[in-house]
Image: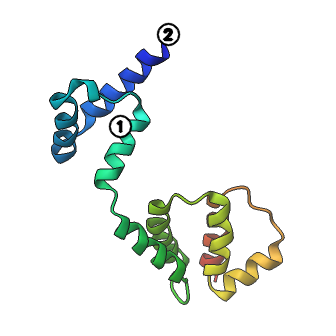
Amino acid sequence: MNHYFIEKIYIVYVIFRLEDDADQQIYAKHHVNALSFYQSLSELLKHLKEIYEDQNLIQKCCCKYVALKQLNKLFSSFYSEFTKIFNFLNYDDIILMNDIQNKINNHLQNALSVCFIKFSSLDKLKIFLQDVNNKQ
């Protein structure tokens, strides 16, 4: 099948799924000048990102992420906050796995240092830390 045709189907699908203000933004672009219709899905998504991405929100999330520490919170509460923040930042799992080891409390850091397990995913590391925290 023609790649150009498939790309147009993706674009039309995304436009169809938009609502409210986003729909109005896109409607204005491709109905005022039909020649400016998006040539690729990435072009459409870039346009939406330029309109709606809040750079202040991303900056705030970066600052919160750097400052985040478990301290005396339960691991589940800490991880919930950790998840909310990193979802905005699009960090790689390997970075998150390294970072979380510096953000957890001393007890969990000690448990990690003596277990000698190489975790293959953030989920597996989370499960291990949750188990250790529950046994505490």
Q: Earlier in the sequence, mark 2 or mark 1?
A: 2
Q: Note whether residue 31 is visible.
A: yes
| Image coordinates for residue 41, horizontal then vertical, percent | 40, 32
On residue 1, the disc is 2
Instruction: Name the residue carrying label 1.
Output: 44
| Crowd band around label 1 with a 10 angstrom C-alpha radius: few (<14), some (14–19), many (20+) | some
- In the picture provided, is 36 more to the left or to the right than 118? left
- In the picture provided, is 55 more to the left or to the right than 27? right
Tag 1: amino acid: Leu
Q: Secondary structure at mark 1?
A: helix
Q: Note whether residue 124 is visible.
A: no
Reply above or below: 32 against 135: above
Tag 2: amino acid: Met
Residue at x 20% of width, y 28% of height: 33
- In the picture provided, is 49 more to the left or to the right than 63? left
User: Which image quarter: residue 35?
Assistant: top left
